[in-house]
């Protein structure tokens, strides 16, 4: 399809550690079209952040990335060299990190940092770059943008810093943005505004957006597609409505029961929980990684787990045929 | 304290203010920053008071004053009607204990779990070594940690287990009030629910009173019996939890509740008309501190401080409301 901008097939990320190899991402596949938002949900250690770093080519030298296919707009990301990757990054694909505090350089002004990408990729003059920066700062809702260019990161509040990060990602009008927990460090009021901004910009510029988060509320409100990750695998994927209205995988269902939902969970009633902890991903894992914590686990879960497809392309990985049992 | 009936307040704050002196340049004169501007609160026995507000509104300063880590500039902290002074910190600590946000930085990595949990007993010279060991065993069991965990170190435990250790440490000297400062926001969703359930169980079992500071309003709604909303060092609305969530009055409370993202895929991100411009606490806005961001602001809001409208167990500080004629409820002005 022409409007598919990113295709990932069988992506693995292996980290060599003292005792062996940590298989942080274990063969995941997804694709993304222009104008689409994919949310990758998962808990810490599920491999969601490494997946986004792997796509951006930002993994450390010792970390091994492998994929059957890793294509950005028809370009094979696995085959191109670091120089070509650097030319793409910040220009046609951009990343927004979680902590605006640590990902902005404290020694440079906001203006310098905003204009850098444009200098680098587009050879735009300083005045031209600054003009564009002011325009974008206005777009992300920063008032008095001109005077902000001369300020340093520490002079801005957390919400403003995160807006600067977004403006920075937009400088070269990228086609793909990956945002890793862009609102986790922010107040709820600011969070709603930043998410709205991202959703508006996505529509306006026909961006493809990957949002990595653990907040199911954020996912439900902004995602077109959802991928639920557990222990380095995508255990369930589908549209937001499919995932939230008919979760199939026992892990996804467990997660939904863990969060208090105003109007649905009765105040004071015990919340659902998932016993146990995420298994170690060092060495190989046979069968379903979730079986130790799963209430449906049987002996069959030790063997290879099939990928099942339910109605409307809703996919999940489980030994049990949960979705069709429920639909029927 | 068996003698206290459930309606009596255990903890009371009267007109607490806290002013810091902030220097804005090497040779500049320090300027006063009012972190708390006259906070009065009552926490009743077995209540869970949820304290909500944006970062920088003074929630943590209030917690520090309650723990005796800071002294208020003016105002009093009362426990069972008795004023607690600076010299009573030891006594205060026996009755009020904290649980902090980040179980990765709030536990000493070089001490074993047994040492960490028993430290309050050592500090307050309670019991001998055998009694302390027994108390630790009992506590670990109560918070759901296996007995073998006592010889472990924080680095060997998961985030959820560490938070259980922090809870055990807070509860081992039988405090009545526990200050929970964002106790679950550093934890994963599946672990968060376990800790919230544990806190609810312990409150029931031990008759604890919580001050629950959180920015996650869904969690506050789930756990709290009363809610206080803070804005720029003042409590702008306080009410029983069910009332506040069913009918928020202050425009700021309304905006906060609107910004909660419930996991409903049929809804989009709400459009809350609340500028991002959190006011500068060194030069707070005139009149009602909230008026520059308020969609319902009138002329009077920028000139006159809002009235304190109280009825029953609720109050709201806002020009938009007044007491009803019979004095029993708060109605639109």
Image (spheres, grey):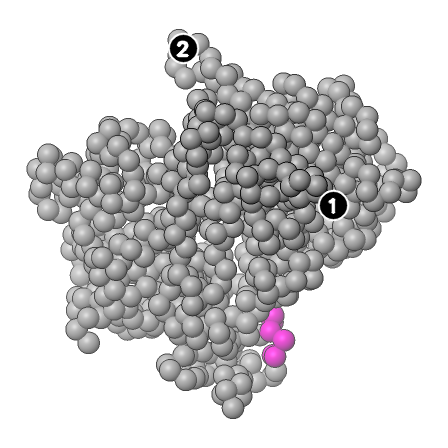
Dot 2: few (<14), some (14–19), or many (≥20) neighbours within 10 Å? few
Front-most of residues B274 and A145: B274
Residue marked by disc 1? B47
Report which quarter residue A307 is drawn in. Answer: bottom left
Mark 2 or mark 1, whichever is nearer to me: 1
Dot 2: what SS? loop
Q: Would residue A185 be found to the left or right of residue B157 on screen? A: left
Mark number displayed over residue B28: 2
Dot 1: few (<14), some (14–19), or many (≥20) neighbours within 10 Å? many
Q: Are marks 2 and 1 in contact (CB under 8 Å)?
A: no
For residue B154, say whether it is visible.
no
Residue displayed at 81% across by 26% down: B82
Dot 1: what SS? loop
**Image quarter hosting the N terminus of chain A:** bottom left
What span is colored magenta in the figure?
A: A292-297
Q: Residue B180 colored magenta?
A: no
Residue displayed at 25% across by 40% down: A137
Residue displayed at 78% across by 23% down: B83
Q: Would residue A9 be found to the left or right of residue B130 on screen? A: left
Please provide percent x and percent y for residue B229: 58, 40
Q: Tell me which chain the residue with mark 2 is part of.
A: B
Please provide percent x and percent y for residue B333: 55, 39
How would you classify the magenta stretch by its main secondary structure? Answer: loop
Please provide percent x and percent y for residue B117: 74, 42
Residue displayed at 36% across by 69% down: A225
Q: Is residue A142 above or below residue A39?
A: above
Q: Is residue A183 above or below residue A43?
A: above
Q: Residue A295 colored magenta?
A: yes
Mark number displayed over residue B73: none
């Amino acid at each position: 399809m022409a409007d598919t901008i990113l295709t990932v097939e069988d992506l693995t990320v292996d980290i060599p550690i003292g005792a062996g190899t940590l298989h942080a991402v274990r063969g995941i596949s997804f694709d993304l079209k222009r104008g689409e938002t994919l949310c990758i949900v998962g808990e810490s250690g599920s491999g969601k952040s490494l997946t986004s770093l792997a796509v951006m080519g930002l993994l450390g030298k010792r970390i091994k990335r492998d994929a059957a296919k890793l294509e950005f707009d028809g370009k094979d990301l696995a085959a191109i060299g670091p120089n070509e990757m650097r030319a793409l990054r910040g220009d046609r694909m951009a990343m927004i990190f979680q902590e605006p505090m640590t990902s902005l350089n404290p020694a440079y002004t906001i203006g310098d940092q905003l204009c850098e990408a444009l200098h680098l990729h587009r050879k735009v003059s300083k005045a031209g770059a600054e003009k564009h920066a002011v325009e974008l700062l206005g777009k992300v809702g920063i008032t008095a943008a001109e005077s902000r260019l001369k300020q340093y990161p520490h002079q801005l509040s957390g919400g403003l810093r995160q807006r600067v990060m977004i403006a920075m990602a937009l400088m070269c009008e990228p086609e793909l943005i990956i945002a890793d927990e862009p609102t986790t460090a922010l107040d709820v009021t600011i969070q709603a505004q930043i998410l709205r901004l991202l959703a508006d910009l996505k529509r306006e510029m026909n961006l493809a957006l990957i949002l990595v988060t653990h907040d199911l509320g954020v996912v439900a409100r902004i995602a077109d597609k959802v991928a639920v990750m557990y222990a380095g695998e995508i255990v369930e994927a589908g549209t937001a409505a499919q995932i939230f209205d008919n979760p199939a995988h026992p892990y996804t269902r467990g997660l939904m029961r863990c969060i208090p939902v105003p109007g649905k969970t009765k105040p004071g009633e015990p919340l659902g929980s998932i016993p146990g902890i995420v298994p170690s991903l060092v060495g190989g894992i046979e069968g379903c990684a979730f079986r130790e914590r799963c209430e449906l686990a049987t002996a069959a879960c030790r063997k290879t787990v099939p990928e099942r497809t339910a109605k409307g392309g809703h996919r999940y990985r489980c030994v049990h045929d949960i979705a069709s049992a429920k639909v029927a | 304290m068996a003698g206290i009936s459930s309606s009596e307040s255990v903890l009371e704050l009267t007109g607490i203010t806290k002013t810091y002196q902030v220097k804005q340049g090497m040779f500049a004169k320090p300027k006063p920053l009012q972190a708390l501007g006259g906070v009065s609160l009552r926490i009743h026995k077995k209540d869970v008071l949820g304290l909500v507000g944006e970062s920088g509104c003074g929630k943590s300063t209030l917690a520090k004053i309650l723990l005796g880590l800071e002294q208020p500039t003016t105002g009093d902290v009362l426990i069972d009607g008795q004023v607690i002074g600076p010299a009573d910190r030891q006594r205060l600590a026996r009755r009020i204990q904290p649980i902090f946000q980040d179980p990765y930085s709030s536990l000493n990595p070089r001490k074993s779990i047994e040492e960490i949990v028993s430290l309050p007993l050592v500090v307050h010279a309670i019991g001998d070594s055998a009694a302390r060991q027994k108390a630790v065993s009992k506590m670990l069991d109560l918070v759901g940690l296996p007995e073998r965990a006592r010889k472990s170190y924080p680095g060997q435990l998961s985030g959820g287990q560490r938070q259980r250790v922090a809870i055990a440490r807070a509860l081992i000297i039988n405090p009545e009030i526990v200050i929970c400062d964002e106790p679950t926001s550093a934890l994963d969703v599946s672990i968060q629910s376990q800790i919230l359930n544990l806190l609810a169980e312990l409150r029931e079992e031990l008759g604890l009173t919580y001050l629950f500071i959180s920015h996650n309003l869904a969690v506050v709604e789930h756990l709290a019996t009363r809610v206080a909303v803070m804005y720029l060092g003042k409590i702008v609305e306080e009410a029983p939890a069910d009332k506040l969530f069913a009918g928020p009055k202050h425009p700021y409370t309304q905006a906060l509740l609107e910004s909660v993202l419930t996991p409903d895929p049929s809804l989009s991100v709400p459009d809350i008309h609340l500028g991002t411009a959190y006011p500068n606490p060194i030069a707070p806005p005139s009149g009602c501190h909230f008026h520059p961001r308020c969609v319902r602001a009138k002329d009077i809001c920028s000139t006159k401080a809002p009235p304190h409208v109280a009825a029953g167990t609720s109050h709201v500080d806002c020009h938009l409301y007044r007491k009803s004629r019979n004095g029993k409820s708060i109605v639109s002005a």
